[in-house]
Image (spheres, helix red, strand yellow):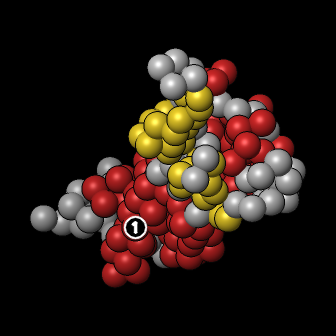
Amino acid sequence: MASSLTCTGVIWALLSFLCAATSCVGFFMPYWLWGSQLGKPVSFGTFRRCSYPVHDESRQMMVMVEECGRYASFQGIPSAEWRICTVVTGLGCGLLLLVALTALMGCCVSELISRTVGRVAGGIQFLGGLLIGAGCALYPLGWDSEEVRQTCGYVSGQFDLGKCEIGWAYYCTGAGAASAMLLCTWLACFSGKKQKQYPY
């Protein structure tokens, strides 16, 4: 099989896939924020949550259901900032994944990635990383929502965690985006082979 990528391009393709996968896994996992409520561990993502309180009719008290799931509707996400974060980060992850899959196809398909296409792909990766970075920056603005305050001891606010801590998925998402912006964007400029000039 002929490749349209240079040696640097192959490294770019693999690194692009790794960055996209890291950001997408981090985005999907509900472990962006850790805390506890009613003695049970609670975690939040942008659109998912683990452990939530429900009223037990038989015992007439609040109990924690220890399950992970997404919010029932888009409007069910606790704050407007987290809703924006979900859309922006999801869009960024989609762009990184699109470029990564195209780059991997370039390993097997000749003349798919030219120098120009490589540079455009790098620009798209930069935009994707920028969107994810913006989503990560917006996320702390939602820490003043009622759900988060219940978990973090009613002392949390915007950019103030209270008794909670940032989870591994937040770092994972941000690290994938930063690597895509800094490394992949640069490598993309040297990824494509110079196209052959045909005499017709």
The quarter in which the N terminus is drawn is bottom left
Residue at x-position 37% and y-position 77%: 11
Residue 92 visible in rendering = no
Query: Which residue appears at 71% of the width and 38% of the height?
Result: 147
Q: Is residue 71 above or below residue 24?
A: above
**Secondary structure found at label 1:** helix
Residue 160: image location, x then y, percent = 85, 59
Q: Quadrant of residue 74?
A: top right
Residue at figure coordinates x 61%, y 47% from the top left = 38
The residue furthest left is 1
Q: Is residue 29 above or below residue 161?
A: above
Q: Is residue 156 visible?
A: yes
What is the three-letter code of the residue carrying label 1? Leu
Of residues 71 and 54, which is closer to you in this image? Answer: 54
Which residue extends farthest bottom?
A: 7
Q: Position of residue 102 (x, y in %)?
A: 36, 53
What is the count of numbered marks? 1
Q: Estimate the x, y position of residue 177 in percent, counting from the top left.
A: 59, 63
Picture residue at 70% right of the left edge, 33% below the top: 78
The percent position of residue 189, horizontal first and vertical second, equals 54, 71
Q: Is residue 107 left or right of residue 26?
A: left
The residue positioned farthest toward the front in the image shown:
59
What residue sits right under mark 1 in the picture? 18
User: How busy is the neighbourhood of tag 1: few (under 14 within 10 Å), some, or many (20 plus)?
Assistant: some
Decide if residue 110 is on the left or right side of residue 187. Answer: left
